[in-house]
Amino acid sequence: MRYTVAKSSEGENRGAAKDKLDAFKEHCRRVGLKVTPQRIAVYEELAGSKEHPSAEMVYRKVRKVLPNISLDTVNRTLLTLNDMGAAFVVEGSGDAKRYDGNLENHQHFKCVRCKKIIDFHYKPFDDIKVPSSIKKKFTVLRKTVYLEGICDLCKKASG
Ligand SMILES: [Zn+2]
Ligand SMILES: [Zn+2]
């Protein structure tokens, strides 16, 4: 499922962010989850971030709004968002899971040096073909193209 939100090229405008939040609340109710301040704060932080933050990173931000929230709660909330499809774990992000609240079609490039995860969108990657041998045996829930390498800044730094 995806939230359809008008795209703005430079960051999120306030109207779109509000629409997104309303869609999220609606989504919670539909799957029988309470709309709690914790869930809202974690969702808003993630949806407004382009950093693909880890739980730790989300925690540091959300704590400014909800000083009593624990890292454990943030962790569990992120997993809940992942389970309900309001966010997802970025592929290849290993132990310190990185999360993404951007549900628009897009792909990732991850720098193996600085661990930055950069969004890009290349249309032909949106609908890659699944071999019939796989389709026959398995149910494919998500297809994704994921690139890994060295980013421009790290390349420059290493000369
Ligand atoms: Zn880098
Ligand atoms: Zn992303």
Image: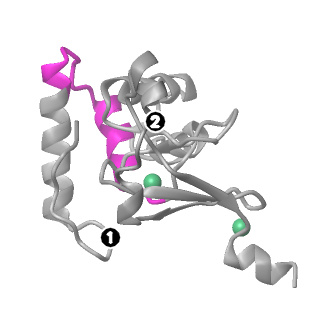
- Work out whether residue 138 can be spotted: no
Disc 2 from disc 1: Cα separation: 37 Å
- Identify whether 134 is placed above or below 3: above
Instruction: Tell me which secondary structure the magenta stretch mostly adopts.
Output: helix
Q: Residues within 10 Å of mark 1 (few under 14, many from 20)?
A: few
- Identify whether 41 is placed above or below 45: above
* Residue lying at 41% horizontally and 49% vertically, measured from the top left: 128
Q: For mark 2, give the secondary structure.
A: loop
Q: Position of residue 82 (x, y in %)?
A: 40, 29
The type of residue carrying mark 2 is Pro
Q: Which residue is mark 1?
A: 11
The type of residue carrying mark 1 is Gly
Q: Residues within 10 Å of mark 2 (few under 14, many from 20)?
A: few
Q: Position of residue 101 (x, y in %)?
A: 37, 46
Q: Position of residue 12 (x, y in %)?
A: 27, 66
Which numbered disc, 2 or 1, marks the residue that appears first in the sequence?
1
Q: Nearer the viewer, residue 154 or 63?
A: 154
* Residue lying at 68% horizontally and 36% vertically, measured from the top left: 94
Q: Nearer the viewer, residue 29 or 142?
A: 142
- Identify whether 115 is placed above or below 72: below
Look at the image and name its color scheme. one colour
Q: Nearer the viewer, residue 28 or 38?
A: 28
Q: Quadrant of the C terminus?
A: bottom right
Left or right: 36, with 92 as reference point: left
Q: Position of residue 14 (x, y in %)?
A: 18, 64
Span highlighted in magenta in the image:
28-50
* Residue lying at 13% horizontally and 21% vertically, measured from the top left: 30
Q: Which residue is mark 2?
A: 131
The question of residue 143 being in magenta is answered with no
The question of residue 46 being in magenta is answered with yes
Q: For mark 1, give the secondary structure.
A: loop
